[in-house]
């Protein structure tokens, strides 16, 4: 079974992007599952604190490692992804071990 992590770039509880991500769970073929990974509790990335153990970041990294792929669903602002992606994902790309 293919495991896909779904990440919504909008933090608003009733966002259209979150609704699209939920719909993708129902449209997903039976050979895969989509687990929504909540990013609303991740802190903004600060390199000064990069080596500090942050519980939410550790839990997020563990969930991401278990996934075979990631589906990003995000609003577009001025031809760019939602700013939170830029500030939160350095936690995942740095210090993967």
Image (cartoon, grey):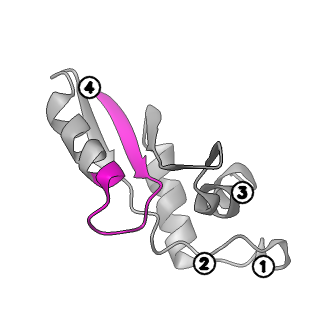
47 over 33 or under it: above or below:
below
Report which quarter residue 34 is drawn in. Answer: top left
* In this rendering, position of residue 46 left or right of residue 2: right
Report which quarter residue 85 is drawn in. Answer: bottom right
Q: Marks 2 and 1: in contact by CB < 8 Å?
A: yes
Q: Is residue 15 magenta?
A: yes
Please name whichever residue, 60 or 72, is drawn nearer the observer in this view of the structure: 72
| Mark 1 vs 4, N-terminal side | 4
x and y percentages locating residue 54 in the rendered image: 60, 78
Q: Residues within 10 Å of mark 2 (few under 14, many from 20)?
A: few
Looking at the rendered image, the quarter that the N terminus falls into is top left
Q: Which residue is mark 1?
A: 49
Q: Which residue is mark 4?
A: 1
x and y percentages locating residue 17 in the rendered image: 35, 50
Q: Which residue is mark 2?
A: 54
Q: Could you give the CA–CA distance between mark 2 and mark 3, rounded to whole angstroms? A: 14 Å
Q: Residue at x 48, y 49 (%)?
A: 75
Q: Nearer the viewer, mark 3 or mark 4?
A: 3
């Amino acid at each position: 079974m293919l495991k896909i992590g779904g990440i919504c770039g909008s933090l608003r509880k009733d966002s259209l992007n979150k609704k699209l991500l939920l719909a993708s769970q129902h449209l997903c073929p039976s050979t895969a599952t989509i687990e929504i990974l909540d990013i609303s509790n991740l802190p903004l990335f600060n390199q000064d604190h990069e080596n500090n153990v942050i519980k939410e970041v550790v839990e997020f990294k563990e969930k991401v490692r278990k996934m075979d792929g990631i589906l990003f669903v995000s609003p577009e602002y001025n031809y760019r992804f939602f700013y939170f992606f830029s500030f939160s994902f350095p936690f995942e790309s740095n210090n993967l071990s």
